[in-house]
Image (cartoon, helix red, strand yellow):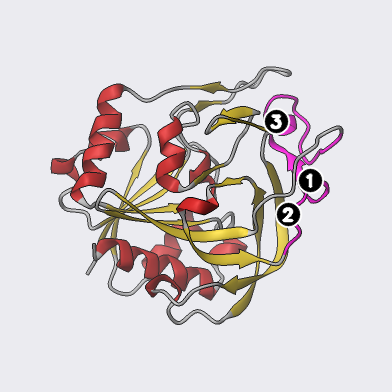
């Protein structure tokens, strides 16, 4: 029976429907710890009771409520980075959900661990200048399963979900694709993250230019001795209630825990 450490905070979410999703997973025990307290458990000794870490958090970002003020990006301490790397070397399993891909923006290697990055502000990423990422809430789209894999077991070849989507950076050459969306991942179909967090303009893409992006919304990686899964799905209770997303998360937990 997998024992899961569920890590949250840094981005708003509806707690009870989210927790109910994990309560409904047969054979999974879970413990909730919020950031920044959770960081104390990111070491080999403290993580030993947990078969999988499920990250639904967004550490390293301090949003500034003042109009025109960009968020502050905080780099984690060197000791934390070392402890995280030790967990990867030890084979700790990680499932990253939805907005977790935006976490620790001042730590480039964190994006390498996950396999991509959601950018709240334009930035250099792997030596390339990248525009801020895009978001779009409440999109009803069709998800296609790209590979037979333990994470996609018992999931239909195609299914529909209503959820938030990201126009973000994906390191396609470094991931094993599992899921793709049929939505159109071009700038005119998304809103600028920078407009939202710096300029106070939610749901705006005025003057914003973004190159077409990846339609991958789920993948796996192996980093060190650890199995990694990223699932873009999971913004709100409508998505939480989707049985296929529930199956994917459950499968992902079991797969990363088995490493």
Q: CA distance from mark 3 to mark 2?
A: 18 Å
Q: Camera-side residue: 52 or 89?
A: 89
Q: Does the image show residue 246?
A: yes
Across and down, in percent, residue 99 comes to 53, 46
Across and down, in percent, residue 219 comes to 48, 60
Q: Element at badge 3? A: helix
Instruction: Quadrant for the C terminus, please.
Output: bottom left
Q: CA distance from mark 2 to mark 1?
A: 7 Å
Looking at this rendering, what residue extends furthest in the right direction? 206
Across and down, in percent, residue 214 comes to 64, 54
Q: Which residue is mark 3?
A: 194
Q: CA distance from mark 1 to mark 3?
A: 13 Å
Say few, some or many: other residues with alpha carbon within 10 Å of mark 3 (under 14 / 14 to 19 / 20 or more): many
Q: Camera-side residue: 210 or 159?
A: 210
Q: Residue at (36%, 32%) from the top-left corner?
A: 36
Note whether 62 is above or below 134 in the view shown.
above
Left or right relative to 218: residue 195: right
Q: Residue at (65%, 28%) from the top-left corner?
A: 122
Bounds of the magenta segment? 183-206
Name the disc covering residue 210, or none: none
Instruction: Quadrant for the N terminus, please.
Output: bottom left
Left or right relative to 82: residue 160: right
Name the disc covering residue 187, or none: 1
Across and down, in percent, residue 127 comes to 55, 29
Q: Is residue 188 magenta?
A: yes
Q: Residue at (53%, 48%) from the top-left corner?
A: 171
Q: Which residue is mark 2?
A: 185
């Amino acid at each position: 029976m997998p024992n899961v450490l569920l890590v949250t905070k840094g981005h708003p979410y509806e707690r009870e429907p989210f927790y109910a999703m994990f309560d409904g997973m047969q054979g999974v025990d879970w413990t909730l710890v919020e950031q920044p307290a959770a960081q104390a458990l990111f070491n080999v000794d403290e993580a030993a009771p947990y078969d999988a870490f499920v990250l639904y958090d967004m550490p390293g970002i301090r949003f500034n409520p003042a109009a025109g003020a960009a968020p502050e990006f905080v780099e984690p301490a060197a000791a934390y980075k070392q402890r995280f790397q030790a967990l990867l070397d030890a084979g700790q399993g990680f499932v990253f959900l939805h907005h977790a891909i935006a976490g620790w923006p001042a730590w480039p290697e964190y994006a390498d661990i996950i396999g991509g990055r959601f950018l709240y502000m334009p930035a250099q990423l792997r030596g390339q200048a990248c525009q801020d990422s895009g978001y779009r809430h409440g999109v009803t789209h069709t998800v296609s399963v790209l590979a037979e894999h333990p994470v996609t077991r018992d999931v239909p070849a195609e299914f529909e979900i209503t959820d938030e989507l990201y126009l973000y950076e994906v390191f396609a050459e470094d991931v094993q694709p599992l899921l793709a969306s049929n939505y159109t991942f071009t700038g005119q179909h998304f809103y600028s993250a920078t407009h939202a967090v710096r300029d106070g303009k939610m749901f705006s893409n005025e003057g914003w230019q973004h190159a077409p992006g990846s339609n991958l919304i789920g993948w796996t990686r192996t980093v060190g001795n650890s199995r990694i899964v990223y699932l873009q799905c999971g913004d709100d209770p409508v998505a939480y209630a989707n049985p296929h997303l529930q199956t994917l998360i459950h499968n992902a937990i079991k797969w990363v825990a088995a490493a």
